[in-house]
């Protein structure tokens, strides 16, 4: 489906679409304007989709992004999500599903928008720059670690299951090795909790994880 067909398909769903001819144009457009959600092809001329989104994320632009591409292998999907993608769809696709996913991403972003700095005890997270501090000390997190921490923050005080993390952070709708989540939580806990008080990341065996002071 061409960009023109995509525009024609989304218009009846209530979307106003801006099209960029190549990766560099897309990067400049996304950086200069405020969009509800971005749709990015992996195979863009000039600058590939991964580089576009990585550059935007590095600049602190957190606009939700959905990869729409012919690259559908597991590693392709993981690369897209690791680059900062919020969702990933493979061509061919149904325009109704795309519209629904874009709507979900936009609603989630609007819900989070008023609260750009999150705090719990002496832990702080700045969403615009993806910066984290604990007791005034800056904590360096990898992109996926940051995404898991922000997700826990948005659900603080609630138990977050492994399935929730796999579906909402990794985009998996099946169950890969359970150690994927466990390893990520372990690395995050080592950076966020080790050497600090109180402990904030709690494990509930057989249930999931919770970010809370107790």
Image (cartoon, rainbow, N blue to C red):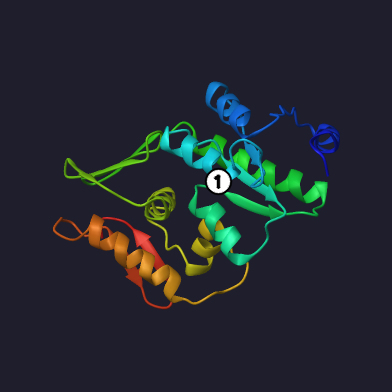
Q: Nearer the viewer, residue 75 or 139?
A: 75
| Image-based side of 141 in relation to 178, left or right | left
What's the residue at 13%, 58% (across, down)? 195
Residue 207 drawn at (x, y percent): 44, 73
**Residue 171 visible at all:** no
Vertical arrangement, residue 15 with respect to residue 105, above or below: above
| Quarter of image, res 33 | top right
Query: Which of the 4 image quadrants contains residue 148?
Result: bottom left
Q: Is residue 15 left or right of residue 132?
A: right
Instruction: Residue at 59%, 42% (x, y): give it.
Output: 48
Identify the image quadrant of the C terminus.
bottom left
Q: Give the residue drawn at x 54%, y 74%.
A: 176
Residue in the image at 21% along x and 45% along y? 122
Q: State the image coordinates of residue 7 (x, y, percent, origin top left).
A: 81, 33
The residue tagged with tag 1: helix, strand or loop?
helix
Q: Is residue 148 above or below residue 46?
A: below
Label 1 belongs to which residue? 50
- Decide which of 115, 15 is in the foreground and name it: 15
Q: Is residue 95 visible?
A: yes
Q: Is residue 209 above or below residue 42?
A: below
In the rendered view, would you say 19 is above or below 156? above
């Amino acid at each position: 489906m061409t960009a023109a067909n995509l525009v024609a398909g989304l218009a009846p769903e209530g979307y106003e679409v801006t099209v960029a001819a190549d990766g560099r144009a897309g990067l400049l457009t996304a950086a200069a304007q405020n969009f509800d959600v971005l749709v990015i092809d992996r195979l863009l001329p000039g600058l590939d989709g991964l580089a576009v989104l990585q550059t935007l994320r590095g600049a602190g632009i957190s606009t939700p992004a959905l990869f729409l591409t012919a690259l559908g292998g597991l590693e392709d999907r993981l690369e897209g999500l690791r680059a900062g993608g919020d969702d990933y769809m493979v061509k061919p696709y149904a325009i109704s599903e795309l519209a629904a996913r874009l709507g979900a991403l936009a609603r989630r972003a609007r819900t989070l928008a008023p609260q750009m700095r999150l705090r719990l005890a002496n832990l702080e997270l700045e969403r615009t720059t993806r910066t984290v501090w604990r007791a005034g000390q800056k904590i360096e997190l990898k992109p996926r670690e940051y995404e898991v921490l922000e997700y826990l923050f948005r659900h603080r005080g609630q138990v977050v299951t492994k399935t929730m993390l796999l579906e909402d952070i990794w985009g998996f709708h099946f169950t890969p090795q359970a150690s994927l989540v466990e390893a990520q939580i372990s690395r995050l806990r080592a950076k966020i909790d080790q050497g600090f008080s109180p402990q904030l990341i709690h494990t509930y065996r057989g249930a999931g994880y919770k970010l809370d002071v107790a």
